[in-house]
Amino acid sequence: MSEVELPDAHELEEHAARGFTRRVAVTTAIYAVVLAIASLGGNNAMKEMLLAQQQSSDQWAFYQAKVIREHLYRAQAMLAESARPDSDVARAFKAEAQRYGAEKKEIEAEAKKLEQLRDAYQKRDPYFDYAEVFLQIAIVTASVSILAKSRTLFGFSLVIAILGVLYAVNGFTLALHLPILHGSH
């Protein structure tokens, strides 16, 4: 009968450790990819929020200019009417005041729409922030699990990474509203 050579226990342990290290390294790379996506989502949410705020502010300034012109034309119509009640000048000033009044309503609606857009992006941003934090913690914990050869730490990194992924997904979808991230809103 031929002899069967059994592997050395130390070799088996070393092979298992290499396999564990590879799995953790691949998983950590996946964490980093998701972190990059969450970071991109957060940056885009912040840019879109700031852009909508700027556009809204521009619209409100435009609105204010229309209000001022409306009042000026209304005052000029009143002066012209006091001098000659049925004058064409008074009617023209009234017509201009009405035109500015109608235009300002459209501008106001656009400004409010931009404010709603800003608010929507503002609600997304904290989810991306927390996603980034959880994913960074997961990466560090996974790295430490390799050094400590600890499957428990690796399991903890998986749980933290899942939280990070859920926060990132929620940043894109706003499927859940977590009041703690939005203050008293």
Image (tube, rainbow, N blue to C red):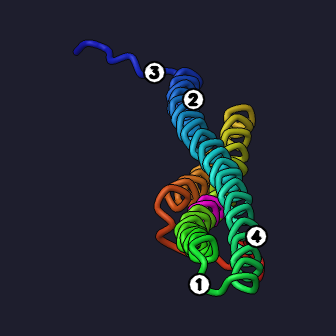
Residue 14: % across, % down: 58, 24
Q: Which of the 4 image quarters holds residue 61? A: bottom right
Q: How far apart are marks 3 and 2 (CA)?
A: 26 Å
- Residue at the disc numbered 1: 86
Sequence-first disc among 1 and 3: 3
- Residue at the disc numbered 4: 72
- Mark 3 vs mark 4: in front: 4
Local secondary structure at mark 2:
helix
Amino acid at pointer 2? Ala
The part of the chain drawn in magenta is 117-122
Is 72 magenta? The answer is no
| Label 4: few (<14), some (14–19) or many (≥20) C-alpha neighbours in 10 Å | some
Q: Residue at x 63, y 60 (%)?
A: 118
- Mark 3 vs mark 2: in front: 2
Q: Which numbered marker is on residue 7? A: 3
Amino acid at pointer 4? Leu
Q: Which residue is drawn at 59% across and 39% down?
A: 40
Sequence-first disc among 4 and 1: 4
- Mark 2 vs mark 1: in front: 1
Is 118 magenta? The answer is yes
Sequence-first disc among 3 and 4: 3
Majority secondary structure of magenta residues: helix
Sequence-first disc among 2 and 4: 2
Q: How far apart are marks 3 and 4 (CA)?
A: 96 Å
Sequence-first disc among 3 and 2: 3
- Horizontally, is 83 left or right of 36 in the view? right
Single out the residue that lies furthest toward the top: 2
Q: Which residue is drawn at 67% across and 39% down?
A: 139
